[in-house]
Amino acid sequence: MRSRQTSSRMNYFRSWNKLLSLSELMTKLRRARRSVALRGGYFISLFIAQCPPRDLNAAAAVGRPCRKDCSSDSSKCKNGKVCLCDHECGYSCINLGKFCSQLPAIPNAEEFQVHRGTNRLSVPSTSTQFLYDDVAEYICSPGYVKQVPTIPHYCHGRSGWTGSTVCILSCRRYNFRKARAYNLVCGRGCQTDQHCDEGLRCLCDGYCGRSCVNPDISCGRAPPAENTRITYTGEGFQRRAYYTCTPGFYLRTGDYERKCTGGGTWDGIRVSCRRITCGNPLTSVQLMGGRVINGLPGPFYVGHEITLWCSSGRRILGSGKRTCLESGLWSGEDTVCDIIDDEIRCPHPGIPINGRLTQGENFSVGNFVEFECDPGYVMIGEARQECYYFLEWSD
């Protein structure tokens, strides 16, 4: 039994045909060359003059079963059907009273959007009834992209959907130079698992790009490196090795994370961990009339302790004892040996380790001092400082 809504649409179309012959109607549509809105929400979104001839092979390729063919000038359509351009099927007899059901689910696609007419009016994706010539577009899940080419999805004349969309893994492109530099053995390129031999899967394989790999492959233990600890996560192709430098060392070069590749080897570059050292404080302290009384001669590794002393007539500001930290810096405050006098001035600003005081011997209010770093070092703080009236240096 035909629903009341469908019957009203058919009755309206028949009443329209009483006023215009089918050939007259098609002529007007051809001249309009735009979407024609019919009562009940229908849109015939086609350019009649551009309708291609019927091509059954092309229609089959996109999944469009063809209805009875017809002509724009003399229709053979019956029972309320309309002669419309049905894309690859050419002019066909279409029953506008039928609907397309919900779109089929596609792996790795999280949602879809449906549009209607040449104005691309949005149709709720929750709808259970879609009209002839509605076009749908799938949206791939995060981490996936559409395979190219993608064939559009149309609601066709037999109340089904045409088109093809495949969501494939989003991988970096094959990089020949990187793969060669890392001595990687790359598998065959692919788009989906269907392109791979039995037992293999199409997965992202680093610089090899999307490749056919054995997900259960074993890469063995990751290459060892001095002064490191290695921890692992995952199994098979998902195996990851993480390098951590032992306490007192820092990562100088290499990749701290390495991955098992489809060729059974580990990607990345061997890590190198270098011992952490703190700067030698002797020079800066001596220039201020002080000295280091223990802990010399260095080098100064993490945990190394020193004691500093200022000569007669000078007072010590900052820390008298300092320890080399894992940050490569000394603990406490900068050590300064300042002359004891009655002058109203700022205290000695200090001389930074691995640096020098280049300008300023007068520390009175309003005077400036300037600092420079030794080659290979960068400055933290202001290179130029002023003695303020409250006898403190500007930051």
Image: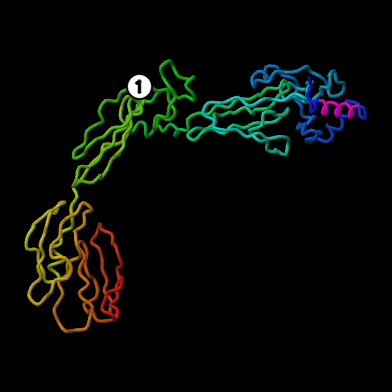
Identify whether 311 is placed above or below 172.
Answer: below
In the rendered view, tell whether residue 121 sits above or below residue 293. Answer: above
Residue for point 39% across, 32% down: 206
Please identify the quarter of the rendering in which residue 118 is found. Answer: top right
**SS of the residue under disc 1:** loop
Residue 63 placed where, x, y %? Answer: 65, 20
User: Which image quadrant is residue 115 in?
Assistant: top right
Count residues near mark 1 (Cα–Cα under 10 Å), then give few for <14, some for 14-19, many for 20+: some
Residue 210 rendering spot, x and y as whole percentages: 44, 28
Q: Which residue is mark 1?
A: 216
- Callout 1 amino acid: Asp
Q: Main secondary structure of the magenta part?
A: helix
Left or right of residue 174: residue 329 = left
224 in relation to 365, above or below? above
> Is residue 9 one of those drawn in magenta?
yes
The outermost residue toward the top is: 198
Q: Toward the viewer: 343 or 378? A: 343
Rendering coords of residue 144 (x, y %): 50, 32
> Is the N terminus in the top left, top right, bottom left or bottom right quadrant?
top right
Q: Residue furthest right?
A: 19
User: Residues in magenta?
Assistant: 7-17
Question: x%, y% of residue 171?
Answer: 45, 33
In this view, the residue in front, 53 or 232, is 232
The figure's colour scheme reads rainbow
Q: Quadrant of the C terminus?
A: bottom left
Name which residue lies at 11% across and 65% down: 308
Q: Using the image, determine if residue 392 lies above or below residue 104.
A: below
Q: Is residue 301 magenta?
A: no
Left-right relation of 249 to 75: left
Residue 60 sits in quarter = top right
